[in-house]
Image (cartoon, rainbow, N blue to C red):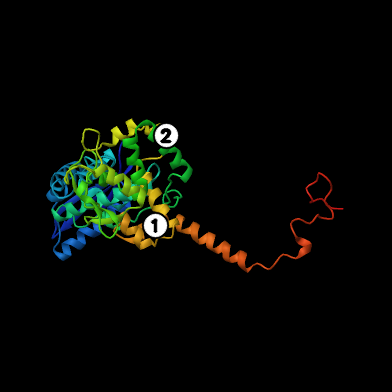
Amino acid sequence: MSIHTRRVTSGALRYDVRIKHAGQLVATRTFRRQGDAETWEREQYRALQLGEFLPPSQTSTPFAEVVATFLAARRDQVTPHTWRTDSDNLKATPRAWDALPISSIGRGDVLRHLTDELKIKARSTVSRSRTTLSALFNYAVQEGMLLRNPVREVSMPAGKEQDSEGIETFTDAELTDTLQRQYELNPLMAEVTEFISLTGLRWSELRSLRVRNLQNLSYPAIRVLRAQSDGYAEKGTKTRKGRTIPLVTRAYEIARRRADGRGADEFLFSSKTGRQLRGNLLRRYLKWGETAHGYTIHALRHYAASSWLRAGIPVNQVSEWLGHKNPNTTLRIYAHVLGEAQDAAAIARLDAMAPAMPPRWDSRTDYPHASKGGNGLSGP
């Protein structure tokens, strides 16, 4: 056995692993957990047998240094938004990792980090953090710093009980009230709110629309080809694929009025001066915090999708209009809306199957034991 246990000044145990080959000491590593030490020991001896052994000089690079080189290499490989998300996710890793050799961070460390994150963040957010970590360790494997990616061995932990991925959005009454109040404040900007609620566009897609994207061939529609989040360069849509969204009469009226007298390359939705819209200005003009019942601009997209599904539009069609890569995404997010329709249909079928009520149980019949002013439930 090449693992030696010792106790440090604080009283905690440390596990020193010494790997020997042909009578020579070829690698050493210290771990805080015995399980990680045993795993690393097995991997080193297996690597020696297979000729895949990595010398300590390659595996001792500190985690923080690997993060820096990874982000530098990744900057030109992904969109600015993705790069920023990766950067933020790596800033949230334990500070204790920074000085540790990349090879000393095992699946136990990864699991504990993800579990801690789940205590304060949504499951989807933590899942995205796991994706970032996996990309980082893949990079370390490719650079010869590691033999394996420990993140791949860690499934998303259960964490606390998670709610379904259902969304919250405006009710019809809330949206009506929001539009009424916003039109009183700024009709030009209120049209933006209404248009998104009718088309389900992402904010980044709406602010990139040009006049030429408005079509009226066999039916009025908007062609979505580009997207630009506030503060980022314009790029393709989220799925890198264009799509066509048909416009109901009211949506077409808004878009046509915006397009009249303007050049094909001008922004379809813009400020009074023709400048591209910005989210913070829209919220300021419309007093969003006071008029939107606590919802975000993105909730308007959820409102549109929910309205389409309640109207009986097939899921595949709704998925295409929303620009989802896979209809399963639509099903996962809006399952509760589809459930409403199924419940209503089930109740209607059950009501139709129910036997006719006997005359003596007619709801208008006076119950024999009901006393005046009573609830009709008392006995004789």
237 vs 119, nearest the viewer: 237
Furthest residue in direction front, as rendered: 261
Circle 1: is it few (<14), some (14-19), or many (20+) Cα within 10 Å?
A: few
**Can residue 40 be seen in this snapshot?**
no
The spot of residue 355 in percent (x, y) is: 68, 68
Furthest residue in direction right, as rendered: 380
The secondary structure type at the circle numbered 2 is helix
Amino acid tagged 2 = Arg
Relative to 91, residue 165 above or below: below
The spot of residue 223 in percent (x, y) is: 24, 53
**Can residue 41 be seen in this snapshot?**
yes
Give whichever of discs 1 and 2 has the lower sequence position.
2
The disc placed on residue 101 is none
Relative to 269, residue 378 above or below: below
Q: Distance between the residues labelled 1 and 2?
A: 33 Å
The secondary structure type at the circle numbered 1 is helix
Quarter where residue 260 is shown:
top left
Amino acid tagged 1 = Arg
Q: Nearer the viewer, mark 1 or mark 2?
A: 2
Query: Does residue 154 appear to the left or right of 291 in the view shown?
Result: left
Looking at the figure, which quarter contains the N terminus?
Answer: bottom left
Residues tagged 1 and 2 counted as in contact (Cβ below 8 A): no
Mark 2 lies on residue: 181
Mark 1 lies on residue: 332
The spot of residue 187 in percent (x, y) is: 34, 35
The spot of residue 182 in percent (x, y) is: 39, 35
**Residue sitting at 57 percent across and 63 percent down?**
348
54 vs 216, nearest the viewer: 216
Circle 2: is it few (<14), some (14-19), or many (20+) Cα within 10 Å?
A: some
Give the mark count. 2
